[in-house]
Image (cartoon, rainbow, N blue to C red):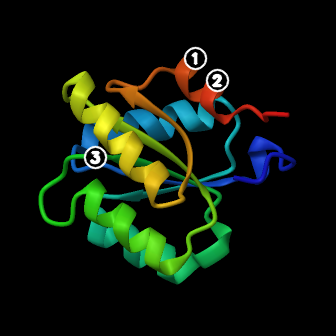
Amino acid sequence: MNATKPFSDLCVLVADDESSIRLHTRLLLRGIGVGRVELAADGREALGLIEEHGAAIDLLILDVMMPGMDGVELMKQLNTSKFAGGVILMSASTAEVREMASLYAKSLGLHLLGMVKKPLTEEALAGLMKPRP
């Protein structure tokens, strides 16, 4: 994620199979000033949007466990496509699953900003998205 861009210039893609989580996350993002939010119901749809919009997507907020192409498979595809945006992983699963997903993302060389337990909060989101020195 480009740390020099103001939130209003960011494009964030939210990939989660639960529509309520997608909509909640979009509201949180809009609440902190993100200008453009795209939504995907699974990994395959997210990958299509990433291929379509390319470098315009600054940040991917990704559910780890989804039917069809899950977050783990999407991370593998992102590595292959050289996705340069930031990634925030989220899951309602156990701490062990969240830790394994984080380690996998790092091993692929993805720009992992963090992992959060669902439901996402505005404070957690803003904290992960703030610029780092």
Q: Where is residue 5 in the image (x, y as percent from the top left)?
A: 83, 50
Given residues 33 and 65, the one toward you in this image is 65
Query: What's the amino acid at mark 3?
Result: Val
Q: Which of marks 2 and 3 is nearer the N terminus?
A: 3
What amino acid is labelled 1 in the image?
Glu
Judge the density around disc 2: few (<14), some (14-19), many (≥20) Cα neighbours within 10 Å. few
Crowd tier of the residue under label 1, counting other residues whose Cα lies within 10 Å: few below 14, some 14–19, many 20 or above: few
CA distance for labels 2 and 3: 20 Å
Residue 100, above or below 11: above
User: What SS does tag 3 mark?
Assistant: loop
> Helix, strand, or loop for circle 1?
helix
- Mark pair 3, 1: CA separation: 21 Å
Q: Percent position (x, y) of residue 116?
A: 41, 28
> At 53% across and 30% down in the image, what residue appears?
28
Depth check, front residue: 122 or 86? 86
Instruction: Rate crowding at label 3 as few (under 14), some (14 to 19) or many (20 or more) other CA atoms within 10 Å.
Output: many
Q: Name the residue under label 2.
A: 127
Amino acid type shown at disc 2: Gly
